[in-house]
Image (cartoon, rainbow, N blue to C red):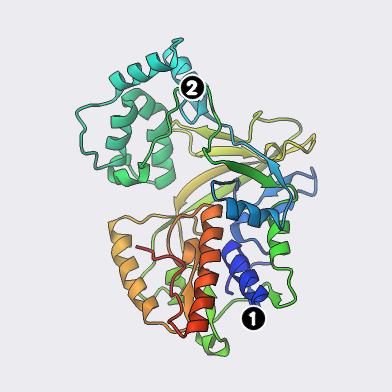
Amino acid sequence: MVGAGLSGAVIGRALAEAGHRITVIDSRDHVAGNCHTKRDPDTGVLVHVYGPHIFHTDDTQVWDYVNQFAQFQLYKNHVKSTTQGQVFSLPINLHTINQFYGKTMRPDEARAFIATQADSTITDPQTFEDQALAFVGRDLYDAFFRGYTQKQWGCDPTSLPASILKRLPVRFNYDDNYFFHKYQGMPRDGYTAMVTAILDHPNITVQLNTTYDPANASQWDHVFWTGALDGYFGFDLGRLGYRTLDFEQFSHSGDYQGCAVMNYGDVDVPYTRITEHKHFAPWEDHQGSVLYRETARDCGPDDIPYYPIRLVAEKALLADYISAARATQDVTFVGRLGTYRYLDMDVTIREALDCARDWQHARMTGAPAPQFSKAPL
């Protein structure tokens, strides 16, 4: 298993329980990948080192799986947004609409009002901006989506496809829970403790601070690669496009912003959001506070890739790398980097469980092993 994040840990555990001996390696000095959490030594706050991760799912099997390895606490994500000199609740809900327009509308009145604001002339939205305008109109788009999206993706929303904004969550009630899912929570002791527990099996050996050389693949019966798809091939065909994040950490002696996540929708504010990590564990009590300002930019060779861009040029290059992967024997490409897709944690775990099952079935029947946990295109 190349990578000790969720994909590598879950597949490794499933195969270890089936009797295989597994070696998990990771170039970092910790397990859990970008879900890594650790205690801040000065405040005791449990910090999400690579940005906050909130577990949410409708998949009962996945929920039951993670609860085998961690005690989950109920956590609902209540996001706020500072824009145009005011603070609003996200996703857009009845409170947001009434506050923004200075009204006291009931749900049916607000629904009818937003319909008048939406651009009804856009019948076949092609861009992100078209899609947003067709949903909510110019005012709400400018306040909550245009600037934030431009900062997040580094280009004008008119350059982004409408598919990025498949469904805009607008609620005509006062529910400001960011996610819709049945199960929502946080592991009480953090994600690193959870992944450590998943990897705690006598058939699993973990080697940290270890870089994998694809040239040594023949030493193993099979390799599961959770790193970047283009990275496996030494970027020989070019680099797939990603956005990365810069984190500016700072501390505060009390409660800095009163919530876990504060978005900044104005384009002249360089960062996209500020996260205050003690609020991700409201069952704990901390006087001090640890915060991060997040700024997005294009990913360079030495940066941590976060969000695949997947525009036209990247999709063409991706097709070439898929062809190269399909010609590679005894390697399965898994996870968000290995399949060049943005994945929530629950989907990552679901695909890892399915991949382990399919790989074992292939071994038993003599069928070809899966080359991807899920096809990238």
The amino acid type of the residue labelled 1 equals: His
x then y, percent, for residue 48: 65, 49
Local SS, label 1: loop
User: Residue sitting at 73 percent across and 72 percent down?
Assistant: 201
Pointer 2 residue: 173
Q: Give me the disc on residue 20.
A: 1
Q: Nearer the viewer, residue 46 or 172?
A: 172
Q: Amino acid at mark 2?
A: Asn
Is residue 177 shown left or right of residue 83?
Answer: right
Quadrant of the rendering where the C terminus is positioned: bottom left
Above or below: residue 81 compared with residue 196: above
Task: Name the spot of residue 251 as percent of width and height, x first.
Answer: 71, 39
Residue that protrudes farthest toward the bottom in the picture: 218
Residue at the image point whose x is 60% and y is 76% from the top: 211
Q: Residue at x 59, y 55 (%)?
A: 61
What crowding class fits label 2: few (fewer than 14 Cα within 10 Å), some (14-19), or many (20 or more)? some
Place of residue 333 in the rendered image (x, y in percent of width and height, measured from the top left) = 47, 71
Res 31 seen here: yes
Circle 1 packing at 10 Å, graded few (<14), some (14-19), many (20+), is few
Work out whether residue 26 can be spotted: no
User: Is residue 278 shown above or below 99?
Assistant: below
Left or right position of 53 against 163: right
Asked which quadrant contains residue 151, the reply is top left
Q: Considering the numbered disc 2 on the image, is that residue within a helix, a strand or a loop?
A: loop
Q: Is residue 245 above or below residue 136?
A: below
- The quadrant of the rendering that contains the N terminus is bottom right
